[in-house]
Image (cartoon, rainbow, N blue to C red):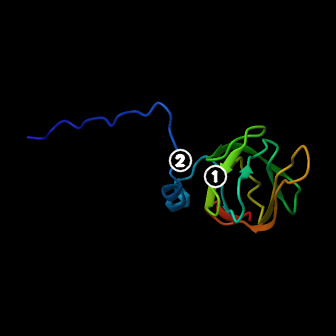
């Protein structure tokens, strides 16, 4: 006799598991989002970081912009995230789609002042999952 299959519990608020996300096969992505894992190696004391909602990806050839949709493990400006002294820190940025013809793009953080990051010439891959070192 077969036992009835139980339905898994439903989470009220889904989370993103970075290791699982990086291992997902590209055909399973049907949302056309771009996932950028950002890594910082903090060599200072009392380092504070945050992300501005104006952060975007820029297609180097067409000039098309992909806007920031969501950020995990980092706060949006004006709130700061403290990075522990001498520790590495990672966060995930999720962007809307870039044109299918895009082969090279930049990651640009526009801020109200100085200090925004810029990662130039990121080669496009079929998974649209990337890892960048910011410091």
Classify residue 40 by image quadrant. bottom right
The residue closer to the viewer here, 87 or 110, is 87
**Which element type, helix, strand or loop, lies under badge 2?**
loop
Q: Residues within 10 Å of mark 1 (few under 14, many from 20)?
A: many
Q: Residue at x 67, y 48 (%)?
A: 82
Q: Residues within 10 Å of mark 2 (few under 14, many from 20)?
A: few
Q: Picture coordinates of residue 75 (x, y %)?
A: 69, 42
Q: Residue at x 68, y 46 (%)?
A: 81
Q: Picture coordinates of residue 77 (x, y %)?
A: 77, 40
Q: CA distance from mark 1 to mark 2?
A: 9 Å
The residue closer to the viewer here, 44 or 54, is 44
The residue closer to the viewer here, 70 or 39, is 39
Answer whether residue 93 is visible to the viewer in this image. Answer: no
Q: Residue at x 13, y 41 (%)?
A: 2
Q: Picture coordinates of residue 94 (x, y %)?
A: 67, 48
Q: What quarter of the picture does the C terminus occupy? A: bottom right
Q: Is residue 114 left or right of residue 80?
A: right
Q: Picture coordinates of residue 101 (x, y %)?
A: 77, 61
Q: Residue at x 47, y 30 (%)?
A: 12
Q: Are marks 1 and 2 in contact (CB under 8 Å)?
A: yes
Q: Is residue 90 left or right of residue 107?
A: left
User: Which of the two labelled residues, at mark 1 and mark 2, occupies the earlier sequence position?
Assistant: 2
- Residue that numbered label 1 is attached to: 92
- Residue that numbered label 2 is attached to: 16
The residue closer to the viewer here, 34 or 40, is 40
Q: Is residue 109 left or right of residue 32?
A: right
**Which element type, helix, strand or loop, lies under badge 1?**
strand
Q: What quarter of the picture does the N terminus occupy? A: top left
Answer whether residue 120 is visible to the viewer in this image. Answer: yes
């Amino acid at each position: 006799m077969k036992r009835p299959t139980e339905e898994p519990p439903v989470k009220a608020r889904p989370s993103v598991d970075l290791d699982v996300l990086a291992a997902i096969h590209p055909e399973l992505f049907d949302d056309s989002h771009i996932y950028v894992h950002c890594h910082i190696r903090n060599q200072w004391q009392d380092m504070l970081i945050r992300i501005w909602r104006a952060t975007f990806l820029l297609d180097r050839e067409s000039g098309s912009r992909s806007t920031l949709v969501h950020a995990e493990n980092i706060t949006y400006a004006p709130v700061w995230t403290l990075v522990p002294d001498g520790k590495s820190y990672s966060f995930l940025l999720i962007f809307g789609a870039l044109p299918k013809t895009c082969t090279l793009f930049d990651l640009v953080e526009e801020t109200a002042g100085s200090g925004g990051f810029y990662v130039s010439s990121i080669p496009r891959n079929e998974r649209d999952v990337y890892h960048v070192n910011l410091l």
